[in-house]
Image (cartoon, helix red, strand yellow):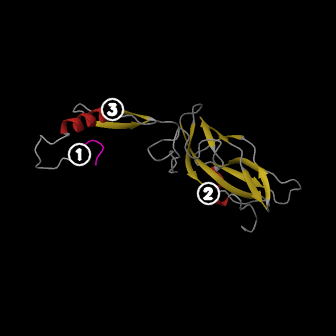
Amino acid sequence: MGRFFPFRRPQRGMPICLRGLARGLAKMDEALSGMTFENGRVEWSANDVPHLVYGDDGCGSFPGDNGAGLPSVGGASRYPFGPEYPFGISIDGAVVTVYPQIVYHGGTALETEQTDVTILADKDWIIIEFDPDASTPAVVVKRWDASRGLPRDHDGLLVRGIWRFALAGEEGAKAASLDRAGWAPGNLGMMTEDGT
């Protein structure tokens, strides 16, 4: 029937001699007292009310989220943090590592290299840039300065914004955090000038 009261759930007006009540209350006490969760801790108020305090893993984590409004993928690795995800990243201070990814252009698979990008200003982007006229096409991962506005094609190069970052902290101790996803994984193959 229920996790703590398997025989019958207590309801208002029932006698306190309800079968299983003491056992159910003991199980509730044990569950609350031993409560833990990933990337945080439980603090108890003076009147024994639990308060969940979430940790700071560099991306402002909270439950069901990786700090960027993106869905969690169970375990310690959450999208987009890790090499197993499309344009997966890791953050160390203001340096963002972008893991290799395969992008298709005209049916040809092009692989990006693992790249470290230093975020220099709040709202900087990490982009991929592609020259469709190059004799040996390559997809380059780099920073797009926030002062240039949103990432856009220029000088015959195709540009796609992947991630935008917030930057906070004092000089010499700046920390980047994921601010926004730009390009959804579903359209990674769309690296053509006409969008087809």
Secondary structure beneath dot 2 equals: loop
Tell whether 60 sits left or right of 21.
right
Circle 2: residue type: Ala
The number of discs equals 3
**The disc label shown at residue 38, or none:** none
Secondary structure beneath dot 1 equals: loop
Asked whether residue 94 appears in the rendered view, the answer is: no
Q: Nearer the viewer, residue 187 or 18?
A: 18
Q: Alpha-carbon distance for marks 3 and 2? A: 38 Å
Q: Which residues are magenta?
A: 1-7
**Magenta region includes residue 3:** yes
Magenta span dominant secondary structure: loop
Asked whether residue 176 appears in the rendered view, the answer is: yes
- Identify the residue position indicated by label 1 in the image: 7
Q: Nearer the viewer, residue 117 or 136?
A: 136
Q: Position of residue 2 (x, y in %)?
A: 28, 47
Q: In the rendered view of the protein, which quadrant contains the C terminus? A: bottom right
Circle 1: residue type: Phe
**Do the CB atoms of the residues marked 1 and 2 lie less than 8 Å apart?**
no
- Identify the residue position indicated by label 3 in the image: 43
Q: Alpha-carbon distance for marks 1 and 2? A: 48 Å
Q: Position of residue 13 (x, y in %)?
A: 10, 49
- Identify the residue position indicated by label 2 in the image: 184
Which of pointers 1 and 2 indicates the residue nearer the eye?
1
